[in-house]
Amino acid sequence: MSLSDLIGYLAATLTTCSFLPQAVHTFRTRDVSGISLGMYSVFTTGVALWLAYGLALQAWPIVVANAITLMLAAAILVMKLRFQGRKTVS
């Protein structure tokens, strides 16, 4: 593995892992009140485009990180759309 691939995988791991606490919190609580629909829509679209870019370049660190992040972001976006009008139970 080249140094640039190693750096790419490390960066991908860190950025994807940094997203996990928000995803886990949202899945557990179903509380989407603090999530902006506009921001998550744009973010999810951007991640999908990064995934397409990585696929076009065959840049596997970009592909792996964005595939995982896209699944999490899309799941949160769906939850936002589904639960946005509901109150959560503490």
Image (cartoon, helix red, strand yellow):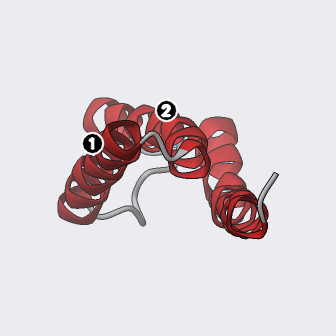
Picture disc at residue 45:
none
**Residue at screen point 20% across, 59% down:** 42
Q: Quadrant of residue 79?
A: top left
Between residues 27 and 57, which one lies in front from this camera angle? 57
Q: Quadrant of residue 76?
A: top left
The residue type indicated by label 1 comes to Gly
Left or right: 63 with respect to 12? left
Q: Dot 2 lies on which element?
A: helix
Between residues 37 and 67, which one lies in front from this camera angle? 67
The residue type indicated by label 2 comes to Met
Q: Which residue is mark 2?
A: 71
**Residue at screen point 59% across, 47% down:** 65
Q: Dot 1 lies on which element?
A: loop
**Residue at screen point 34% across, 52% down:** 50
Residue 89 in view in this figure: no
Q: Closer to the N terminus: mark 1 or mark 2?
A: 2
Circle 1: is it few (<14), some (14-19), or many (20+) Cα within 10 Å? few
Going by the picture, which residue comes out furthest to the front? 2
Between residues 4 and 44, which one lies in front from this camera angle? 4
Q: Quadrant of residue 56?
A: top left
Marker count (numbered): 2
CA separation, marks 1 and 2? 23 Å
Picture disc at residue 85:
1
Circle 2: is it few (<14), some (14-19), or many (20+) Cα within 10 Å? some
User: Percent from the top left, x then y, of residue 71?
Assistant: 49, 32
User: Percent from the top left, x then y, of residue 45?
Assistant: 23, 49
Of marks 1 and 2, the one in the foreground: 2
**Residue at screen point 68% across, 68% down:** 4
User: Percent from the top left, x then y, of residue 39?
Assistant: 25, 65
Residue 67 in view in this figure: yes
Q: Are marks 1 and 2 in contact (CB under 8 Å)?
A: no
